[in-house]
Image (cartoon, grey):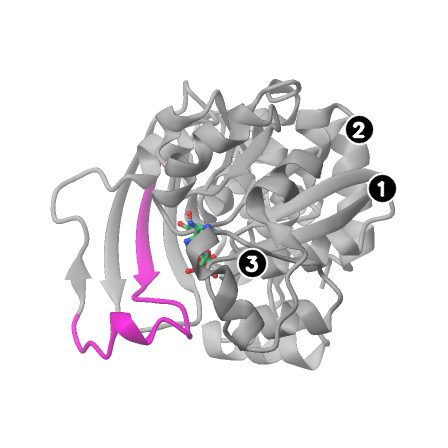
């Protein structure tokens, strides 16, 4: 059993903990938090041993009636691998600690690419991270773009990818980011960080990205144009994408017009927290004009990186190859709509 420690039990950390727990080859040996809150309480109720990330704040947990299993250093020492799901920039501060205990660490997309030995996406470069000490699971948007780029590049070749990302202003719980009533080019200059970030997975891919932020919390939406090296029909592209286990093609008769109904679907089919781990691509938006492919996809920012973290654990420790790991993760989580 792979012993997994999770440092940072917020939006991403709590989801990764549950996904790891669902696997039969790994277990969560503890989660670390900086302060007691509803998420810390839930962690304890779920039976995850709770560790304090900051020593001076440890008494706050006891005062809130939450029993601690120890300090984060003990968790890092005991773990085969740490998933760092702390806020952007904190992972970089924690790196030294992971080195001190010689525990390999996975970081999230909020950290800079140059913090780590290699960035990771299961569909893009699974085999490149084995044995690495510091690996970054790329952000939600980069994960969504990498999953789409991989089959298109393999099957048709990509001349150039152009993507406009309409980004949710904040997660549902991030009240500090709102309310807002605007549409912000973000950043105003090109490219947004997403294109260069996709190139950490596909160094040779030609990709330009623009970003906008809108007052929404549910999902990101990508408007995608890919100039292909060949001229498949739209149906051939649909057939190809349909075979990908982490791409969900929204069927025309589902009558889903946006993120609101997608999230409603997720709740209806019993997804934990209403999560949508797959890219959600509107099937009828897939169009070809000459060699130019167009489509719209929605990305659930809080959850598409979760299965990728599970795969990254096996990839770093070398316990499975890409196909085995992805199949195992998908099966255990209940992937596929
Ligand atoms: P979050 O704020 O929801 O959760 C972070 C958790 O870490 C919180 O519980 C916080 O209390 C805790 N924390 C803060 N400082 C800590 C420390 N020093 N040690 C241990 N824990 C600490 O953040 P999140 O949305 O889960 O983001 C985590 C990472 O995942 C970031 O790099 C982010 O960019 C990335 N990411 C976020 C999303 C998203 O949409 N939320 C999507 C993909 C990737």
Can residue 215 be seen in this snapshot?
Answer: no
Image quadrant where one finds the N terminus: top right
- The residue that appears at 76% across and 40% down in the rendered structure is 3
Determine whether label 1 and label 2 are within 8 Å by CB: yes
Q: Earlier in the sequence, mark 3 or mark 2?
A: 3
Nearest the viewer among 232 and 260 is: 260
Q: Badge 2 local density, few (<14 within 10 Å), some, or many (20+)?
A: some
Q: Earlier in the sequence, mark 1 or mark 2?
A: 1
Label 1 belongs to which residue?
A: 25
Q: Name the image quarter holding residue 193.
A: top left
In whole angstroms, how far apart are the C-alphas of marks 3 and 2?
22 Å
Tell me if 183 is positioned left or right of 256 in this view.
Answer: left
How far, Cα to Cα, is label 1 from label 2?
A: 10 Å
SS at circle 2: loop
Residue range (magenta): 159-182
- Is residue 174 magenta-colored? yes
């Amino acid at each position: 059993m792979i012993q997994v420690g999770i440092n940072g039990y917020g939006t991403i950390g709590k989801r990764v903990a549950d996904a790891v727990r669902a696997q039969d080859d790994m277990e969560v040996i503890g989660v670390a938090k900086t302060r007691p809150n509803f998420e810390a309480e839930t962690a304890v109720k779920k039976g995850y041993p709770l560790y304090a990330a900051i020593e001076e704040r440890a008494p706050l947990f006891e005062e809130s009636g939450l029993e601690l299993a120890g300090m984060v250093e003990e968790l890092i020492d005991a773990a085969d691998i740490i998933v760092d799901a702390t806020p952007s920039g904190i992972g970089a501060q924690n790196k030294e600690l992971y080195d001190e205990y010689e525990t390999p660490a996975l970081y999230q997309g909020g950290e800079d690419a140059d913090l780590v030995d290699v960035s990771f996406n299961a569909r893009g470069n699974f085999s490149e991270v084995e044995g690495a000490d510091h690996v970054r699971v790329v952000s939600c948007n980069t994960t969504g773009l990498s999953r789409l780029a991989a089959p298109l590049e393999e099957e048709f070749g990509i001349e150039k990818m152009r993507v406009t990302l309409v980004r949710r202003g904040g997660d549902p719980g991030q009240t500090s980011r709102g309310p807002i009533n605007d549409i912000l080019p973000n950043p105003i200059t090109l490219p947004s960080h997403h294109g260069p970030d996709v190139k950490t997975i596909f160094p040779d891919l030609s990709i330009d990205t623009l970003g906008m932020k809108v007052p929404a919390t549910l999902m990101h939406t990508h408007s995608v144009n890919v100039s292909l090296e060949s001229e498949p029909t739209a149906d051939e592209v649909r057939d190809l994408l349909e075979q990908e286990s982490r791409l969900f093609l929204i069927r025309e008769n589902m009558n889903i017009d946006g993120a609101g109904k997608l999230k409603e679907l997720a709740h209806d089919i019993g997804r934990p927290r209403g999560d949508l781990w797959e890219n959600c691509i509107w099937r009828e938006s897939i169009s070809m004009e000459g060699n130019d492919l167009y489509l719209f996809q929605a990305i659930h920012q809080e959850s598409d990186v979760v299965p990728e973290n599970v795969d990254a654990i096996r990839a770093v420790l070398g316990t499975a190859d890409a196909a085995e790991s992805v199949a195992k993760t998908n099966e255990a989580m209940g992937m596929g709509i």
